[in-house]
Image: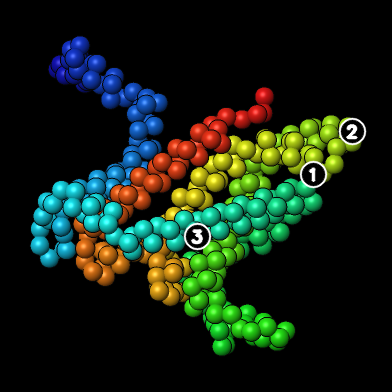
């Protein structure tokens, strides 16, 4: 009796195309494909939440649009209106005033704090304390300072009255309002700015300070001859970031003064917001937003070139 063979059936050889397809399917992703996979979420987010709104905003700046009817193309009418709008120029002036106060005080204070942290202590706890105000939102910080600086009940004016000085309407007076808002934001952001500068100071070799001490250099001379020149690239980037952020001030104004008194704190972002969501003039608000974008772009380019942010003196 013959027993049938139980050997497995012979597998037909794959042709050249099938073998190549199978080999490619088993090949791991290359560096380029892997990099594209990792940056895809950020790229999609950038396109959806930044690039597309920017392009649509530029297009809306040439239209009349109020959400109730389709956008109507009107050409440069919004820009002509903006040029002849005294409130726009007043808002731009107020914003520039705020930026100068905020950047000047914040930069000097942050630099002093960073140098003290680097030269006197390396305590992580102290760095955490310095950063604490930054962890508070702009809205909460604005409300807290609004209560503290209240003319009648605020602890700030209670202290002023206790020492025999007249109470100061910090947020209700045209002269005091913008400097007060600037100081509130300085208080909130100075710790974060100081830690950025502190990180830049950590990159400066200690050997340079030791050599300067051997030569008899004072602390002030080391600061002007070593610290500032070598910190310049980091300081330049920090200045660019803070200037852009300062031009976009909105939250603190919205919860403290709402643009008052008498438009004394009606910064450009708040005026844009009021035009869009208060008066539903989205085309005109988009035109002012485009103007702000152009101003910030020019300021950034000028700052970058003047401060030589892309160069370093560390050889």
As displayed, is residue 27 above or below residue 168? above
Q: Which residue occupies 26% across, 64% down?
A: 276
Quadrant for the C terminus, please.
Answer: top right
| Circles 1, 2 touching at the beta carbon (< 8 Å) | no
Q: Residues within 10 Å of mark 2 (few under 14, many from 20)?
A: few
| Residue that carries the numbered disc 3 in the rendered image | 98
Q: Which residue occupies 31% across, 24% down?
A: 26
Mark 3 against mark 2, which lies toward the viewer? 3
289 or 251: nearer the viewer = 289
SS at circle 1: helix
Q: Which residue occupies 70% across, 52% down?
A: 112
Q: Position of residue 251 (x, y in %)?
A: 43, 66
| Circles 3, 2 touching at the beta carbon (< 8 Å) | no
Q: Earlier in the sequence, mark 1 or mark 2?
A: 2
| Residue that carries the numbered disc 2 in the rendered image | 214
Q: What color scheme is it?
A: rainbow
Numbered circle sitting on residue 220: 1
Q: For residue 302, say whether it is visible.
A: yes
Q: Earlier in the sequence, mark 3 or mark 1?
A: 3
Q: Residues within 10 Å of mark 3 (few under 14, many from 20)?
A: many
- Distance in Å between CA atoms under marks 3 and 1: 30 Å
Numbered circle sitting on residue 54: none
Q: Which residue occupies 66% across, 62% down?
A: 129
- Distance in Å between CA atoms under marks 1 and 2: 15 Å
112 or 96: nearer the viewer = 96
As displayed, is residue 146 above or below residue 57? below
Q: Residues within 10 Å of mark 1 (few under 14, many from 20)?
A: few
92 or 224: nearer the viewer = 92
């Amino acid at each position: 009796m013959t027993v049938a063979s139980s050997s497995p059936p012979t597998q037909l050889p794959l042709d050249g195309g099938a073998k190549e397809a199978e080999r490619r399917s088993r090949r791991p992703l290359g560096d380029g494909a892997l990099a594209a996979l990792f940056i895809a979420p950020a790229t999609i987010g950038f396109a959806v939440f930044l690039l597309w709104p920017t392009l649509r905003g530029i297009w809306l700046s040439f239209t009349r649009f109020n959400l109730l009817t389709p956008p109507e193309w009107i050409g440069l009418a919004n820009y002509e209106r903006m040029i002849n709008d005294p409130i726009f120029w007043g808002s731009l002036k107020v914003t520039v005033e705020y930026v100068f106060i905020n950047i000047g005080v914040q930069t000097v204070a942050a630099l002093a704090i960073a140098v003290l942290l680097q030269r006197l202590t390396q305590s992580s706890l102290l760095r955490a304390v310095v950063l604490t105000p930054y962890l508070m939102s702009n809205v909460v910080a604005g409300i807290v300072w609004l209560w503290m600086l209240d003319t009648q009940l605020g602890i700030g004016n209670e202290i002023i009255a206790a020492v025999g000085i007249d109470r100061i309407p910090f947020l209700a007076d045209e002269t005091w309002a913008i400097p007060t808002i600037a100081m509130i934001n300085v208080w909130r952001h100075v710790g974060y700015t100081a830690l950025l500068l502190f990180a830049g100071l950590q990159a400066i070799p200690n050997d340079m300070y030791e050599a300067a001490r051997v030569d008899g250099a004072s602390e002030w001379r080391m600061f002007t001859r070593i610290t500032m020149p070598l910190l310049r690239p980091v300081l330049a980037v920090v200045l660019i970031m803070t200037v852009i952020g300062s031009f976009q001030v909105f939250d603190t104004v919205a919860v403290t003064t709402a643009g008052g008194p008498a438009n004394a704190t009606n910064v450009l972002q708040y005026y844009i917001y009021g035009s869009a969501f208060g008066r539903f003039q989205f085309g005109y608000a988009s035109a002012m937003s485009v103007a702000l974008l152009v101003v910030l772009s020019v300021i950034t380019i000028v700052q970058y070139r003047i401060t030589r942010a892309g160069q370093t003196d560390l050889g």
